Amino acid sequence: MEFKVLIIDFGSQYTQLIARRVRELNIYCEIFSFNNLPKNILEYSAVILSGSPFSVHSKNAPKIDITKIKGKVPILGICYGAQFLADYYGGQVGKSSTREYGRAKLNIHDTKNLLYGFKNNTQVWMSHADTINKLPSNSEKLASTEDVKNAAFKFKSEHTFAIQFHPEVYHTTYGIKLLENFLVKISKIRQTWTPDSFVKMTVQKIKDKIKKDKVILGLSGGVDSSVAAILIKNAIGDNLICIFVNNGLLRKGEFESVLNQYENMGLNIIGVDRSKQFLDNLKGVTDPEEKRKVIGNTFIDVFDEEAKKIKNAKWLAQGTIYPDVIESKSIKGPSATIKSHHNVGGLPDFMKLKIIEPLRMLFKDEVRRVGKTLKIDDSVLGRHPFPGPGLGIRILGDITSEKVSLLQEVDSIFINSLKEEGLYNSIWQAGAILLPVQSVGVMGDERTYERCIVLRAVSSTDGMTADWINLPYEFLQKVSNKIINNVVGVNRVVYDISSKPPSTIEWE
Ligand code: XMP
């Protein structure tokens, strides 16, 4: 990689957002926790120090040996990062008279460097309890606000900068400009990070790493595993062997259609239908977490069995993406958690394979952009997220094949209607849930006592929070009629109007 930026995470809720903004500038960056820094730190073109929930004076305050990099690589300290620099080099950091959250107007003292092109009184976003009362020696002030004396400063004769406000949030009017000034003007980084360059670089890397080995990949039909598959295929061709398991809990017709679609994409794919095995194992299981365990363990058994049939496979590919890899939202401090496989009875054979995760540095929308570069069909890239345990966690209570078929029919009517009405693409995720209750109805002259279906459609950016979608009444009316008229056994349809939190997207 020609240019890369290191973001040192001190545990701020905004760390991932900093990375997003840097990537938006077409500059590649990586986040590392302060307690797990890369060895080749001087190979980075610039370093950004994140904020933190800690005060520099707390006993457990995150600290690093900044002397190794200061003056050698351009540094930008943000919020706690700024306070850390001030404190380390002899400045004075203390409690603000009031905790400062929200908008402030920046009074600019120096428009040459970091704040090049800024207009006086521009809006910035503050979020801090401590403040820098005295600047460290050998530094100069760049900006202040009404409440914050030292809102931005720099160390003399070197590219080390510090700002109290957050350039990564949209409320900071010139936030992106500030990052661009730091990375492009000051650190001289070229903006060459694009999906196209990522594809070229990754394909080459995979070729070099895998050589003539065989790689196995479990496809789910989702965006991440599909993009990972095509990337790897572009590097090693048919030495990538994909396995797609039908757990009997997929959407209506999806096993066949997805398999077909993958074959058309030229993937070397094995489709395994184990619906019966999954449903047998799930018999009588009603607890949501227990269902997940049964489905997860059955998947491991099936995948292990299939993987063993592929001779000489040395690698297991996964569609892991960045939010799965790093979790920096913890209030206790940063933590880089790698997704682990929970399996109790010893490692299955396929887990002894070496792991390759070509998307582990990408955010979801970047995965989609890479997918577009790889010319993957929009119908794959635009697919709503679908949980691994599938309809299993949308059938409340015990699961039977009759209930699966019924829910598949309802779900298919709902999803197809969303597509027909042009609503599908503006929704993050939608689906139907089968309740374990029956209610009274009347059809013709008959009294009925049948099932109740819930429709759910939400907006979200990452699934962590979500809001229900205000679907048009006419649409809900049409879809409800269609479901009740076409799916025998359903006499009531309701729409879920709960947000997450306090609800969740899935009902189980
Ligand atoms: P919740 O229900 O927690 O869901 O709001 C957030 C997102 O995660 C998906 N989800 C799962 N995905 N295995 C998965 O692979 C699971 O057990 C699981 N549970 C929830 C859910 O569909 C939503 O996108």
Image (spheres, rainbow, N blue to C red):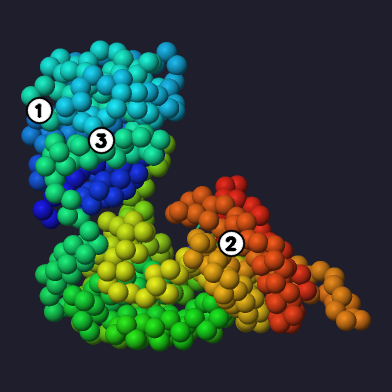
Q: Nearer the viewer, residue 87 or 258?
A: 258
- Image check: 444 left or right of 492? right
| Image location of residue 346, percent across then percent down | 36, 67
Is disc 1's CB within 8 Å of ligand 1? no
Inspect this view and state whether residue 120 appears. yes
Q: Relative to 316, say whether 331 is above or below.
A: above
Q: Which residue is mark 2?
A: 457
Residue type beneath disc 1: Glu
* For the residues bearing labels 3 and 1, Cβ distance under 8 angstroms: no
Residue type beneath disc 2: Ala
| Image location of residue 4, percent across then percent down | 16, 49
Q: Which residue is mark 3?
A: 178
Label 1: few (<14), some (14–19) or many (≥20) C-alpha neighbours in 10 Å? some
- Quarter assignment of residue 230: bottom left
Please give the name of the residue rendered at 49% of the width and 66% of the height, measured from the top-left corner.
425
Q: CA distance from mark 3 to mark 1?
A: 17 Å
- Closest to the camera, between mark 3 and mark 1, is 3
Is disc 3's CB within 8 Å of ligand 1? no
Q: Which residue is mark 1?
A: 158
- Image check: 336 left or right of 442? left
Label 2: few (<14), some (14–19) or many (≥20) C-alpha neighbours in 10 Å? many
Q: Secondary structure at mark 3?
A: helix
* For the residues bearing labels 2 and 3, Cβ distance under 8 angstroms: no
Q: Earlier in the sequence, mark 2 or mark 3?
A: 3
| Image location of residue 318, percent across then percent down | 31, 68
Q: Secondary structure at mark 2?
A: strand
Q: Nearer the viewer, residue 110 or 64?
A: 110
Residue 125's mark?
A: none
Q: Relative to 475, say whether 122 is above or below.
A: above
Please give the name of the residue rendered at 28% of the width and 62% of the height, measured from the top-left corner.
359
